[in-house]
Image: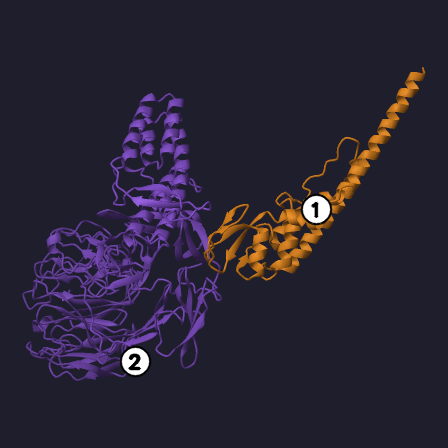
């Protein structure tokens, strides 16, 4: 028996040996019902034919992409292509000058790629020195005998081992370098491309399989180190789309059967044991007994997942998540040349494509404001519609630099229309710059604030890692923090509610609002639309939040183009997603929601009010607040009733703290006494005493005084008010308490 | 007989609330009965029908048809002869809304025909149940205000006549008893 030099598999099995005979074996009788492990297949080989060649030294075989022909390298400098079926058909490929070691590389280190159909050399890579700075391929056999190449069976990629102990992957498009893999520790090593280009295991003289993950696709595949114990452990990661689209399992399977042979299979010049044999072990694998005899019967385990030894992991890429792309809130997808540029609670702006230009139509929900059209020559793609006007922006294109255009709502307003080009000739100087850790995802603004959302870092393991900055009118940064969204989701929309609460809506259907307190802020979920949607295939396209209603347009999918004319908005009432809550909500939730929104309203009002002495704004705001407080107190008293009945004294006291008027606290005390919770009633009266000193300085009373100032009554009497601080009312705010007197007019 | 005219019934029905989508921004309307608003497009508001018609005639709002005023629901009611979900003043309301806001209500012609059919069917049911009329009561379910108004003269007069007849029979029996 002669030494088997190489085994190639395709539809047939080819073996070459030192007897200069090539055996061609065909697989027949694939018996799967045998009583063996299902992971293995037993093949019976039928001796097909053989041919002898003039291979005097170690020749080698290469498999071509078609299964019919096999090419045989000879040391005469030619490559012969032999049709496997009809062995008489031989074609020769000339070109190599030196002895051919593999079919395409020769001792000098030139690589040629042959096209078998026309039998011509498609590409020749010549040996280049290691010092070249150009990105040309560097191929030199690390040792003349051991320059190995391997084709990916789909024919698209080729791997070749290179001088600096790397493996070069060449793609077939234009025979250019696709990737480099390595370096590995041993000079003499060879790689085989897996079926799917997903992993390249390498063997070295130290009989280890070096971990290698996919270099080209973001797959999570780790091959653990083989400590020559005979177990090859493969950790398969998640499947992802790869350009070659093959199955992971098949790849491993194929490779395991043939190529994952433990031990070295280097074909070296060293002494070869004469006692060569082909041994079939229990697993029915064929392997060669060359230089090293395996210590024990080998078994290749499939899908045996263990934790790889971390020190040996090279080039391991974790599960990749793409950073989400930037978006403009309110922009829809294109539907036959039309799409919405902006769609919010103020109005809509949509673009209609015409032959040479586009027309942008702007319509407002309030029909008092006249709608208008803009001729778009700059191909505006971004826009924002506000109370004062519409701003449009375009990217740079062949004809124009990036452009900004503003059109006021009312032509007769104080504001003027303007156009700004971002080029060198514009004379404007920027006012400032801000560095961000990664690209901006979206921006939205209202009358007082600007919200910017950006990536804090690269997306990792389904987490987009978003952060936000909230700026105010004077461009001061108020808050800079993380923006939490549901795990595995992306940000779909950001905006401000009518009261000014910053909002975010993610692809899982959860609406979150930013709750701000003095010195602290947090995002809280306000609405979970998936509860409402249930099993239906619907997407709630967000438009805005007004009061306690989330205004949306219902469509089938996220990227559904919206209809024209503007569709009817649907109102979804905000419902804080408490645990174990029925769809209609509970009283507790309503109370908590009311308190939350009221606190935000007051906070934002205090922050944004420009003229604190503008009494009209103050009085309307205060009347609104007092109405809300009254409603909330009613709900609070209902809750008190329930808690006193249930005997939950601590909860009753907590609710009492949140009541807004003295009358409500009195009612709460009465309820507690009625239910015989005397201790609770005592505590409530303490609360009342404390709070009356600080909280219940009745603002409404003060405002009424301001309104009545200098008012002349019908009987000729005049009311005046005098600003006077008194010691009885110690209040936290700076507005002093007035004294009202009536003067009789002379 | 006290007749209530149809116009008067329509006037009474105008107090019912319907949902309206304002197209113009309006502040709170402080009216004698109640305060309505503020009207902020595109949010919807609940207002009485008379106010809705007033605003609609001035193109300041768009009327949202009520739940029951849809082709599928009305045809469903017709086939199943189940009129429980119809409001008490359905005829008046539909007459008012269809007269004023035909453009806002989809398939207004179909709805008009369906409502007329419902009305005819109810009338036929009433006629069938006349034989159940006795001196004490007459049971008919799911009547609308207009229908009651239409049947009232007939039913009340019939009740009176039947009672008189019954009384006279009773008297006659008493008389005949007393003879012995």
Q: Quadrant of the N terminus of chain A?
A: bottom left
A44 sits left or right of A107 in the view: right
Where is residue A265, by image quadrant? bottom left
Q: Chain of mark 2?
A: A
B45 sits left or right of A688 in the view: right
Residue nearest the observer in this picture, A446 or A152: A446
Where is residue A402, by image quadrant? bottom left
**Few, some or many residues within 10 Å of mark 1 (<14, 14–19, 20+):** many
Residue nearest the observer in this picture, B40 or A515: B40
- The total number of labels drawn is 2
- Label 2 secondary element: loop
Label 2–label 1 contact, CB within 8 A: no
B163 sits left or right of A247 in the view: right
Chain letter, purple? A
Label 2, label 1: how many angstroms apart (C-alpha)?
A: 69 Å
Position in image of residue A495 (x %, y %): 34, 57
Name the residue rendered at 53%, 60% in the picture: B60
A549, above or below B162, in the image: below
- State the mark number for residue B146: 1
Name the residue rendered at 39%, 26% in the picture: A670
Point out the residue furthest to the right here. Answer: B179
Q: Mark 2 vs mark 1: tell me if same chain.
A: no
Residue nearest the observer in this picture, B15 or A70: B15
A273, above or below B1, in the image: below
- State the mark number for residue A400: 2
């Amino acid at each position: 028996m002669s030494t088997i030099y190489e085994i190639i598999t395709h539809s047939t099995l080819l073996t070459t040996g030192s007897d200069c005979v090539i055996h061609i074996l065909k697989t027949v009788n694939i018996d799967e019902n045998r009583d063996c492990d299902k992971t293995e297949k037993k093949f019976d080989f039928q001796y097909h034919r053989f041919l002898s060649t003039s291979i005097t030294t170690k020749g080698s075989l290469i498999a071509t992409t078609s299964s019919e022909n096999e090419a045989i390298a000879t040391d005469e400098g030619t490559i012969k292509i032999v049709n496997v079926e009809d062995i008489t058909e031989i074609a020769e490929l000339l070109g190599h000058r030196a002895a051919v070691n593999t079919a395409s590389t020769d001792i000098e280190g030139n690589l040629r790629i042959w096209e078998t159909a026309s039998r011509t050399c498609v590409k020749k890579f010549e040996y280049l020195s290691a010092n070249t700075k150009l990105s040309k391929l560097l191929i030199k056999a690390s040792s003349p005998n051991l320059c190995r190449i391997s084709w990916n069976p789909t024919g698209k990629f080729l791997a070749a081992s290179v001088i600096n102990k790397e493996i070069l992957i060449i793609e077939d498009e234009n025979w250019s370098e696709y990737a480099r893999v390595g370096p590995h520790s041993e000079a003499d090593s060879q790689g085989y491309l897996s079926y799917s280009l997903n992993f390249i295991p390498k063997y070295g003289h130290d009989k280890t399989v070096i971990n290698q993950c996919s270099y080209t696709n973001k797959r999570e595949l780790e091959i653990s180190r083989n400590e020559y114990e005979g177990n090859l452990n493969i950790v398969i990661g998640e499947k992802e789309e790869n350009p070659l689209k093959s199955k992971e399992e098949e790849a491993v399977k194929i490779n395991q059967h043939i190529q994952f042979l433990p031990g070295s299979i280097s074909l070296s010049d060293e002494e070869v044991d004469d006692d060569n044999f082909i041994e079939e072990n229990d697993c029915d694998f064929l392997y060669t007994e060359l230089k090293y005899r395996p210590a024990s019967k080998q078994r290749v385990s499939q899908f045996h997942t263990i934790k790889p030894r971390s020190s040996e992991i090279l080039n391991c890429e974790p599960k990749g998540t793409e950073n989400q792309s930037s978006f403009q809130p309110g922009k829809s997808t294109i539907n036959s040349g039309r799409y919405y540029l902006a769609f919010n609670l103020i109005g809509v702006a949509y673009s209609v494509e015409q032959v040479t230009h586009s027309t942008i139509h702007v319509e407002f929900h309030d029909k008092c404001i006249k709608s208008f059209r803009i001729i778009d020559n700059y191909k505006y793609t971004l826009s924002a519609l506000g109370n004062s006007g519409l701003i449009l922006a375009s990217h740079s294109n062949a004809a124009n630099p990036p452009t900004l255009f503003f059109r006021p709502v009312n032509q007769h307003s104080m504001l003027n229309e303007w156009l700004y080009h971002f080029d060198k000739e514009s004379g404007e100087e920027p006012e400032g710059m801000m560095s961000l850790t990664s690209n901006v995802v979206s921006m939205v603004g209202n009358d007082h604030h600007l919200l910017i959302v950006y990536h804090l870092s690269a997306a990792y393991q389904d987490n987009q890692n978003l952060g936000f900055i909230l700026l105010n009118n004077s461009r001061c940064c108020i808050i800079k923090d993380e923006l939490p969204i549901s795990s595995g989701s992306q940000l779909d929309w950001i905006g401000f509610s009518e009261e000014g609460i910053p909002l975010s809506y993610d692809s899982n259907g959860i609406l979150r609002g930013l709750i701000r307190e003095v010195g602290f802020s947090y995002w809280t979920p306000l609405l979970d639309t998936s509860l409402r949607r249930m099993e239906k295939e619907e997407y709630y396209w967000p438009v805005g939040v007004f009061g306690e209603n989330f205004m949306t347009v219902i469509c089938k999918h996220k990227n559904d183009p919206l209809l024209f004319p503007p569709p009817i908005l649907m109102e979804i009432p905000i419902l804080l997603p408490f645990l174990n809550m029925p769809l209609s909500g509970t009283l507790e939730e309503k109370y908590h929601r009311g308190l939350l929104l009221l606190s935000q309203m007051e906070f934002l009002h205090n922050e944004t009010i420009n003229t604190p002495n503008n009494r009209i704004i103050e009085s309307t705001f205060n009347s609104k607040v007092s109405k809300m407080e009254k409603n909330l107190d009613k709900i609070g008293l209902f809750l008190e009733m329930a808690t006193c009945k249930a005997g939950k004294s601590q909860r009753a006291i907590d609710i009492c703290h949140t009541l807004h008027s003295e009358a409500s606290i009195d009612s709460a005390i009465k309820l507690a006494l009625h239910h015989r919770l005397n201790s609770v009633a005592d505590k409530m009266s303490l609360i009342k005493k404390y709070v009356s000193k600080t909280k219940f300085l009745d603002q409404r009373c003060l405002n009424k005084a301001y309104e009545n100032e200098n008012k002349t009554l019908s009987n000729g009497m005049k009311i005046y008010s005098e600003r006077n601080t008194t010691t009885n009312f110690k209040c936290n705010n700076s507005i002093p308490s007035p004294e009202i007197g009536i003067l009789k007019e002379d | 007989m006290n007749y209530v005219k149809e116009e008067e019934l329509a006037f009474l029905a105008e107090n019912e609330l319907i949902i309206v989508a304002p197209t113009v921004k309006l502040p709170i309307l402080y009216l004698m009965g109640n305060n309505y608003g503020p009207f902020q497009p595109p949010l919807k508001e609940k207002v009485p029908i008379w106010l809705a018609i007033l605003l609609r005639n001035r193109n300041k709002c768009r009327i949202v048809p009520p739940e029951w005023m849809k082709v599928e629901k009305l045809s469903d009611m017709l086939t199943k002869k189940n009129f429980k979900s119809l409001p008490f003043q359905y005829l008046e309301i539909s007459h008012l809304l269809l007269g004023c806001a035909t453009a806002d209500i989809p398939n207004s012609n179909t709805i008009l025909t369906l409502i007329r059919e419902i009305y005819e069917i109810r009338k036929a049911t009433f006629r069938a149940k006349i034989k159940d009329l006795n001196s004490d009561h007459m049971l008919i379910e799911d009547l609308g205000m207009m229908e009651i108004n239409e049947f009232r003269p007939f039913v009340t007069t019939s009740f009176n006549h039947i009672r008189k007849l019954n009384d006279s029979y009773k008297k006659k029996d008493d008389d005949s008893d007393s003879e012995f």
